[in-house]
Amino acid sequence: MTYSRSITLVLTHDCPWRCRYCGFRSDHEGLISEDRIDRIVREASEGGAKEALLISGERPGTMPHIGSELAQRGYPDFWSFAAVVADRFREAGLFPHGNFGRMTEHELRRLRPHFVSMGMMLESAVDDPGCAPEKKAVGRKAGIEAAGQAKVPFTSGILVGWGESQKSRLQSLEVLSGIHSQYGHLQEILIQRYVPNQGSSWPAGAPPTLEEYREMIDFWRKHAPGVAIQIPPNLEPRWFELLDELDDLGGISWAKDEVNPSRPWEQLEHYRNLCRRAGRELKERLPVYPTHATEEWLDPIWQNRVREEG
Ligand code: SF4
């Protein structure tokens, strides 16, 4: 069982869209300050994080106030800003993983040398859980395909527990496995339970039963063998009952979960002890899996860094 010691840095919560399930977005926050970036880089190094998860609202650079701030601070666009912040973490010895929503193949290729891996949830290929009209399944699917075309080691997954059927969950997994069979870039998928946060106006639905979780996991193993399955343990309190079936617990941090602030993680020792009791050892991993730490998937700078980590 693996996990990643991580810290999250939100480049901005600002997002032009309004999804009903979202408790993350804001309108006029602006970009994170240089001082705060310095503080988080320091905190990440001192806390022993390996993964720096950099996130934002979707295409914040299209918002006029963000465009003006980028220009004032000397960045040609949002992707340049994201690249510079990622480099600050790399220089401090961390491995940046980016999740900025849907990006084009060209944008992903620009960020590829700066991030060891990237991600975006499919959520659902069948229904839209209260998404903004701009954020439809067809667009998310295209974004995941673009990451495959850009040869980016990628994390995706489905959102469960917002009112969807088991049939739609399996159809969504089938779509992900179909994309993966074409490009081979998925290193892991999340089965992520929806948790309404402050600001979410979409109600939670029935979560999958343990049998339904097991059916999804079996389905995934058959359709995408070798691609790890993760359930974030701070979002699904029954993760322990699925311990035999899982590969990974995802990013675990001493700092808050920036996307689900109402669900902090337990201490790492808590997860370690529960795994040990079930005969599993909890091991730290990097945000790029060994399956993708190769010349085909990583720029030389990252291949060397991964090698140095042993
Ligand atoms: S879910 Fe993403 S795209 Fe939708 S409003 Fe929130 S930040 Fe924006």
Image: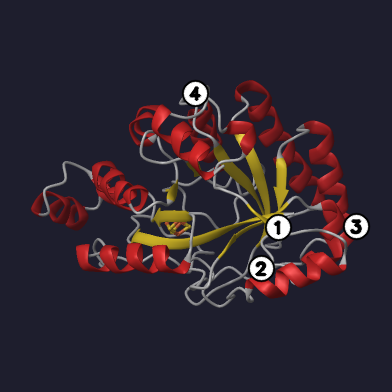
Identify the image quadrant of residue 304: top left
Q: Label 1: how many residues lie within 10 Å, few (<14), some (14-19) or many (20+)?
A: many
Q: Is mark 4 on a helix, strand or loop?
A: helix
Look at the image and name its color scheme.
Answer: secondary structure
Residue that carries the numbered disc 3 in the rendered image: 211
Q: Do the residues labelled 2 and 1 touch (CB within 8 Å)?
A: yes
Identify the image quadrant of residue 266: bottom right
| Above-or-below relation of 45 to 291 | below
Residue that carries the numbered disc 2 in the rendered image: 235
Q: Is mark 1 on a helix, strand or loop?
A: loop
* Nearer to us: label 3 or label 2: 2
Q: Do the residues labelled 3 and 4 touch (CB within 8 Å)?
A: no
Q: Label 3: how many residues lie within 10 Å, few (<14), some (14-19) or many (20+)?
A: few
Identify the image quadrant of residue 41: bottom left
83 vs 295, nearest the viewer: 295
Q: Which residue is drawn at 49% across and 55% down?
A: 50
- Residue 11 appears left or right of 281: left
- Residue 301 appears left or right of 246: left
Q: Tell me the CA gap for discs 2 and 1.
A: 8 Å
Q: What residue type is labelled 1?
A: Ile
Residue that carries the numbered disc 4 in the rendered image: 149
Lower sequence index among marks 3 and 4 = 4
Q: Which residue is drawn at 33% across and 32% down?
A: 110
| Above-or-below relation of 79 to 146 | below
